[in-house]
C-alpha cells in the first residue's frame, strides 16, 4: 500500500460507533460486578503474641465485623480475642475501645504496625446508589 491508497480508504463512522458502544457496555458491566470493601487504616502495636488496636467508638461496631486485615501486604483473617470497655483518652477526650486481635506472624514486642482493616463488602453498583 502506498500513501495514495491509504488516503482513499473509505471511512465508516457507524462501525467505529458500534464498536466503541460495545466496548463501553462491556467495561461498565465488568465494573458494576466488582466487589469492594470499605477500609479503615490505623496503627496498632504488638503485645504478647497479639495485635492491640485502639479503635474510636464510632468505628467500633463496623470494625469488629470486619472480614480481614492487612499488615505489609500480608492478608490475615480478623479474629477478635478481646474487646475492652469504653475508655477515654484524657488528652483528646475521645472515647475508644481496646481490641486485641490474633496474629499469625511474630513481631518484636511493642512494635508499632500500620494496619488496614477491610469491612463492609459491597458491589460497586450499590456504592454508587448510596452516593446518589
Image (tube, rainbow, N blue to C red):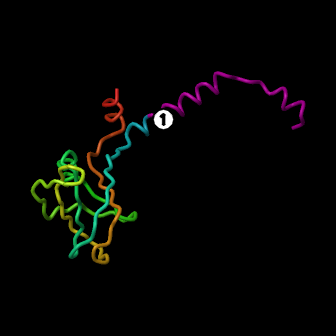
The residue identified by callout 1 is 26
Q: Position of residue 116 (x, y in %)?
A: 33, 56
Mainly helix, strand or loop, the magenta region?
helix
Q: Position of residue 80 (x, y in %)?
A: 17, 61
In which quadrant of the rendered view does residue 21 lie? top right
Residue, far front: 91
Q: Is residue 51 left or right of residue 131?
A: left
Q: Nearer the viewer, residue 2 or 70?
A: 70
Q: Nearer the viewer, residue 118 or 47?
A: 47
In which quadrant of the rendered view does residue 105 lie? bottom left
Identify the residue at horizontal 28%, vertical 73% (top origin): 110
Q: Is residue 95 left or right of residue 111?
A: left
Q: Is residue 75 magenta?
A: no
Q: Quadrant of the C terminus?
A: top left
In which quadrant of the rendered view does residue 82 lie? bottom left
Q: Is residue 2 magenta?
A: yes
Residue 73 to residue 106: above or below: above
Q: Quadrant of the N terminus?
A: top right
Q: What kind of element bears circle 1? A: helix
Q: How many numbered marks does the figure carry?
A: 1
Residue, far left: 85
Residue 87 to residue 103: above or below: above
Identify the residue at horizontal 30%, vertical 59% (top origin): 69
Label 1 crowd (10 A; few <14 / some 14-19 / many >=20): few
Identify the residue at horizontal 64%, vertical 27% (top origin): 16
Q: Position of residue 12 (x, y in %)?
A: 70, 23
Q: Position of residue 29 (x, y in %)?
A: 43, 35
Identify the residue at horizontal 21%, vertical 47% (top origin): 62
Q: Range of the magenta residues? A: 1-28
Amino acid at each position: 500500500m502506498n500513501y495514495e491508497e491509504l488516503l482513499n480508504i473509505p471511512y465508516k463512522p457507524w462501525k467505529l460507533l458500534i464498536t466503541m458502544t460495545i466496548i463501553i457496555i462491556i467495561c461498565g458491566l465488568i465494573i458494576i460486578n466488582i466487589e469492594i470493601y470499605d477500609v479503615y487504616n490505623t496503627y496498632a502495636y504488638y503485645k504478647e503474641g497479639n495485635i492491640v488496636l485502639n479503635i474510636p467508638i464510632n468505628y467500633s461496631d463496623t470494625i469488629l465485623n470486619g472480614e480481614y486485615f492487612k499488615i505489609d501486604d500480608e492478608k490475615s483473617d480478623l479474629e477478635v480475642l478481646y474487646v475492652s470497655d469504653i475508655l477515654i483518652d484524657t488528652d483528646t477526650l475521645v472515647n475508644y475501645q481496646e481490641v486485641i486481635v490474633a496474629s499469625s506472624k511474630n513481631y518484636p514486642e511493642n512494635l508499632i504496625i500500620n494496619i488496614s482493616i477491610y469491612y463492609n463488602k459491597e458491589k460497586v453498583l450499590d456504592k454508587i446508589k448510596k452516593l446518589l
